[in-house]
Image (cartoon, helix red, strand yellow):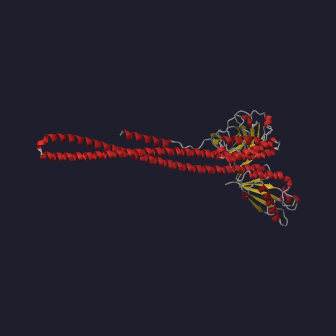
Amino acid sequence: MKTGNRFSITFFVAFIALSLAPFVMGQGDARRKTVAMTYLKDPVGVPMAGTTIRPNARGEATVERWRKRNESEIDVKVENLIPAFNYGADYTTYVLWAITPEGQVDNLGEFRLKNGEGRLKAATPYQTFALIVTAEPHYLVKLPSKKVVLENRAPSSRNVQIKASEIYFSGDSGKYYTDSSPPEIASRDYEKIPPELIQGRRAVQIARMADSERFDPNDYHEAVQSLNEAEASYRRGAPAYDVGRVARDAISKAVRALSISEEKALAADRRAEINRRDEEVRRATESATDLQSRLSDTESRLKASEIARVNAEEQHNISLREAADARAENRRLKSEVNQLQDDNERMSKSLSDARAQVTSLQSQLSSTSSQLNATSSRLNEASSKAEEMERKERERRELEARRRDFATLQSALSALLPVKVSGDGFTATLPDAFFVLNKKDLALKIKSKIDAVATTIAAHPNVSFSIVGHSDARAGADAFALGRAQSTADYIGALGVPRDSLKVDSRADSVPLASNKTLKGRAMNRRVELIFSSPR
């Protein structure tokens, strides 16, 4: 009985351990709170107030909601900000965020400061959101850091509805922020370095801290290579724009390496947890097998006792028959019979005890089997849920990554070309000045700008778009417009833009922007449009 109880307790402890073991889903991020506002239709001025780490900072945001475009336009001006590196060598720039009541965060772009002032124009599909400004290591971060320097306050306008309760969102946990002291380099020397190069150094450093050399070596080494190229260009005295272009490529690759490394690290943790649980089940199964073996041994001893009892009863009957035939030996045989009866009683009692022990062991085995089945069922259910949650989380991150990549592309092209935002994307326009007059070929004088456009688009290979040519009213307008669109596609394709990500088309003279009766109007109508659709 003691042996059976000991094995029963062992299985019970194993069952409790398996039932209560936590399933690690990944490191939790820091939880923050702020106030969100709902914007209606008229432009609203929203004050931006400094936080405790920069109380002198202030700003003003103008927000206008466009219902038909399902978009909120934002124009933010800030002042009295100090360089981000004053909060520590981990920080290089300031980023504007939009935060929804559901806790979704949207990187709207970075501020370029001059004398502590900066301005940023952005757009978001959200109607209800909060605005904050944080110090960040680079402009492509996915979650806001703890260094919140500005946040919105309630405006005095009846066109804004303030949420009744504070909203919460997930910020960066800070595990990659290790240096809270300002850099030793003098600020005047620090400001001479292109900001993209400084941000590229920090982005590659973060990827290294996330162990990207092990989890995503290809993207990590490409990021390091791009950063080294930018460093070499800077040392050679190359223009800041060329240095920044290569550094931005390093930042993009480092962010991709960081994202993949974090996903793989999380998957490795989950696999380790599943392996640990499998090992516990294996040990529990081995204990059950040992218990079954002990039960079989007890049953064998029980059968041997039963055979001995039957033999004793037969011997007793023989003795009785011999007593009838030989009464002379009755006294001696009676003593033997009494002895046999005593032995029989002891054996019967032993048999009864053995049967009780078998019953107890069978009950313990049944209970242990039920517990083992329940544990296996929970493990299977937990594994299925984990796989489903992992799939949904991966799809959500991929969609968010595509949207951020799309927003980054829009912001980058806005600095190079006229951009018009629409409800399902945006359109960047190459005006007539980009082409040889009345020719289909691109003009040599704009080579640097079209190179920058191609490099920017090539940095976002997952974004598809259309190149549409437009003409003024002339004979062969369709061929003229298509020829310019094809020239543009061939040029940017030669600079690294994937051919399968673009589509070439012509609208001839069917969509004029101005009258064809004047030279200026005809020039406006001769254009090539790059049409980008938002990711779904």
Q: Nearer the viewer, residue 232 or 265?
A: 232
Report the number of discs.
Answer: 0
Asked whether residue 1 appears in the rendered view, the answer is yes
Q: Residue 320: x, y in percent?
A: 16, 46
Q: Nearer the viewer, residue 502 or 38?
A: 502
Q: Residue 215: x, y in percent?
A: 64, 45
Q: Residue 51: x, y in percent?
A: 70, 36
Q: Nearer the viewer, residue 51 or 282?
A: 282
Residue lying furthest right:
519
Q: Quadrant of residue 9?
A: top left
Q: Residue 324: x, y in percent?
A: 12, 46
Which quarter of the image is occupied by the N terminus?
A: top left
Q: Nearer the viewer, residue 164 or 372?
A: 372
Residue located at (69% from left, 37% from top): 147
Residue located at (78% from left, 63% from top): 507
Asked whether residue 101 appears in the rendered view, the answer is no
Which quarter of the image is occupied by the C terminus?
A: bottom right
Residue lying furthest bottom:
475
Residue located at (20% from left, 40% from top): 339
